[in-house]
Image: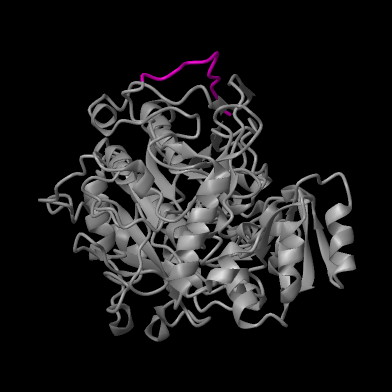
């Protein structure tokens, strides 16, 4: 297995693309954010001013206002997990502990909504989130956990017609996600495990990245090939940007994008999968995250992005970018008959603020079985999604994007000289078109066999996509690029987490748009945070944690398994599409 080691600390030129964001103190910033959000959803002034309520997410605050007598399931993160103070308090309030969650320094519990203020006021409680698996939400995908595993998706996209001829051999997919667990399904095809988090191991404590990797390149050998991915012969480079809670920041993602670009030639990266996003509505024409994704595209890497799981008339960034291939999720109705397919109700789609219709196409996205990361957050919270010993079901546009990335690997095997614009035109020109896709399904359902045949024959070589599009300048606000998603970090090293805001990155370094976007992108990487297996050499970083507005890691799918990094209201699990 090929690998590399980044030695020592290399502090990047502050004019490079790894800039970002200003911080403010968590105490005042969180109160202000929650106050504004409560005003939007109609919460009363007394609820806003009650001490401790800044520790509750917006869903719980709404429940407290509307139905104070309701019993709610919550996730509690403790201040001092080694003690039982918070657990004892739950019992004293008449509630009950339902599950220990050591991965997040906390536990899940059932309590009466009227007791939430008392729970939140305790110094032993750091944050309280509603458990998304029971939270009412028209856009959540958690409800699909009980559905049967999807065994129709391979036939629906005509993948069997390619088996034995194309496996993605010789093609490398890069993935910016939550890392990747060790599994025999990946063999020796994981060329590098890059880690931009304090974990320094490239592993997957959250569980999202491993699932994406299995869909793209897993060979299913742990289950005699039953749950193999789309391109079981392709190589993978994993760039980890989030730990056990699924939280990360736009500045870290941009650093990861720069790393991919700087190391494209070393690992032969052809495709990049981004199964996450933010809810920002800043124009792509100036947005730093869009700019970063475009730089990777314009340098010859085909970028596949999930649309998001927030439903109609929404689209996640950078999936709003007209250059990249944005993927929504299709509901196959459990059959290989494509005539009954529809766009999944949670799948994001519609017009962007810049007037582009997204997504570009759809792919199967409901109960897709793939590798799981043992002991990860998602696995712990969703045992009902387990399939056999090493697999689990996942639902969302993340899974759909991973399928398209796998199909792209087969296409690049058929035509190694294909450009991203030609690859996009090929996929769009060969989709299965259905009336039900017209609302927000783009060009239609991806057709693996049709796309690979067209790539091999060079059908779209002289008719590439994206002609006439104007690239982003990257001169906008990195803070606005975050949308409503926020994380805490400790950039000044004082032991007190700060809410990451403004034009400062998670390292506490200032970001200046003009100098950042004008520098050469291929030259440097955020190596002060990078480790590449089998070893690492990096400086200490405090990492990130959720903001007080929500915790998306509790939902496997749509509004939180997309990374709320990677949809709810913090950049953590709900944005992981």
Q: Quadrant of the N terminus?
A: top right
Find residue 568 and report its horizontal and vertical position in percent.
52, 63
Does the image show residue 566? no
Residue drawn at point x = 13 percent, y = 54 percent: 463
Residue drawn at point x = 35 percent, y = 42 percent: 478
Find residue 55 and report its horizontal and vertical position in percent.
64, 57
Q: How is the image coloured?
A: one colour
**Number of numbered tags placed on the structure image:** 0
- Residue sitting farthest toward the left: 468
The span shown in magenta is: 1-13
Residue closest to the eye, 550 or 287: 550
Seen in the image, is 495 located left or right of residue 502? right
Q: Is residue 505 magenta?
A: no
Seen in the image, is 185 located left or right of residue 191? right
| Magenta: main secondary structure | loop
Does the image show residue 87? yes
Q: Is residue 466 above or below residue 9?
A: below
Find residue 42 and report its horizontal and vertical position in percent.
48, 75
Q: Quadrant of residue 60?
A: bottom right
């Amino acid at each position: 297995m090929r690998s590399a080691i980044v030695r020592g600390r290399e502090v990047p030129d502050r004019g490079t693309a790894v800039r970002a964001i200003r911080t403010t103190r968590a105490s005042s910033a969180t109160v202000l954010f929650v106050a504004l959000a409560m005003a939007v959803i109609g919460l009363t002034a007394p609820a806003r001013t009650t001490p401790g309520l800044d520790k509750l997410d917006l869903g719980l605050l709404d429940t407290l206002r509307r139905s104070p007598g309701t019993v709610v399931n919550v996730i509690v993160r403790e201040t001092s997990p080694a003690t039982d103070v918070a657990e004892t308090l739950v019992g004293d309030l008449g509630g009950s502990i339902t599950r220990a969650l050591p991965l997040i320094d906390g536990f899940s519990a059932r309590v009466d909504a009227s007791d939430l203020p008392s729970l939140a006021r305790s110094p032993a409680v750091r944050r309280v989130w509603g458990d998304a698996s029971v939270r009412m939400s028209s856009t959540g995908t958690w409800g699909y956990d009980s559905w049967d595993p999807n065994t129709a998706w391979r036939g629906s996209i005509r993948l069997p017609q390619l088996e034995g001829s194309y496996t993605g051999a010789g093609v490398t997919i890069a993935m910016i996600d939550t890392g990747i667990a060790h599994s025999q399904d990946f063999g020796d095809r994981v060329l590098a495990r890059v880690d931009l988090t304090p974990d320094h191991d490239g592993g997957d404590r959250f569980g999202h990245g491993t699932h994406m990797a299995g869909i793209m390149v897993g060979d299913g050998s742990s289950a005699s090939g039953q749950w193999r991915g789309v391109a079981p012969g392709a190589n993978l480079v994993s760039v980890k940007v989030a730990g056990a809670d699924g939280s990360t920041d736009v500045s870290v993602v941009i650093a990861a994008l720069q790393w991919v670009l700087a190391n494209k030639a070393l690992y032969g990266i052809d495709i990049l999968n981004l199964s996450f996003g933010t809810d920002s509505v800043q124009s792509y024409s100036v947005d730093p995250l869009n700019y970063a994704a475009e730089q990777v595209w314009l340098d010859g890497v085909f970028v596949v992005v999930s649309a998001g799981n927030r439903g109609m008339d929404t689209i996640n960034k950078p999936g709003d970018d007209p250059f990249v291939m944005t993927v929504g999720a299709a509901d196959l109705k459990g059959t290989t008959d494509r005539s009954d397919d529809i766009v999944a109700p949670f799948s994001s789609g519609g017009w962007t603020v810049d007037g582009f219709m997204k997504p570009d196409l759809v792919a199967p996205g409901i109960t897709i079985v793939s590798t799981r990361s043992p002991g990860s957050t998602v696995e712990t919270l969703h045992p009902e999604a387990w399939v056999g010993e090493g697999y689990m079901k996942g639902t969302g546009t993340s899974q759909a994007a991973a399928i398209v990335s796998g199909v792209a690997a087969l296409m690049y095997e058929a035509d190694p000289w294909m450009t991203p614009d030609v690859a996009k035109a090929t996929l769009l020109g060969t989709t299965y078109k259905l009336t039900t896709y017209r609302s927000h399904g783009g060009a239609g359902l991806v057709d693996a066999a049709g796309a690979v045949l067209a790539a091999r024959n060079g059908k779209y070589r002289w008719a590439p996509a994206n002609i006439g599009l104007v690239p982003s300048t990257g001169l906008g606000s990195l803070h606005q690029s975050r949308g409503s998603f926020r994380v805490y970090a400790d950039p000044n090293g004082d032991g007190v987490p700060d809410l990451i805001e403004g034009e400062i990155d998670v390292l506490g370094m200032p970001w200046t748009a003009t100098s950042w976007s004008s520098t050469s992108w291929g030259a440097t990487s955020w190596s002060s945070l990078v480790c590449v297996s089998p070893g690492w050499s990096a400086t200490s970083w405090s990492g990130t944690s959720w903001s007080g507005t929500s915790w998306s890691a509790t939902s496997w799918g749509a509004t939180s398994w997309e990374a709320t990094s990677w949809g709810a209201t913090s950049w953590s699990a709900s944005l992981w599409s």
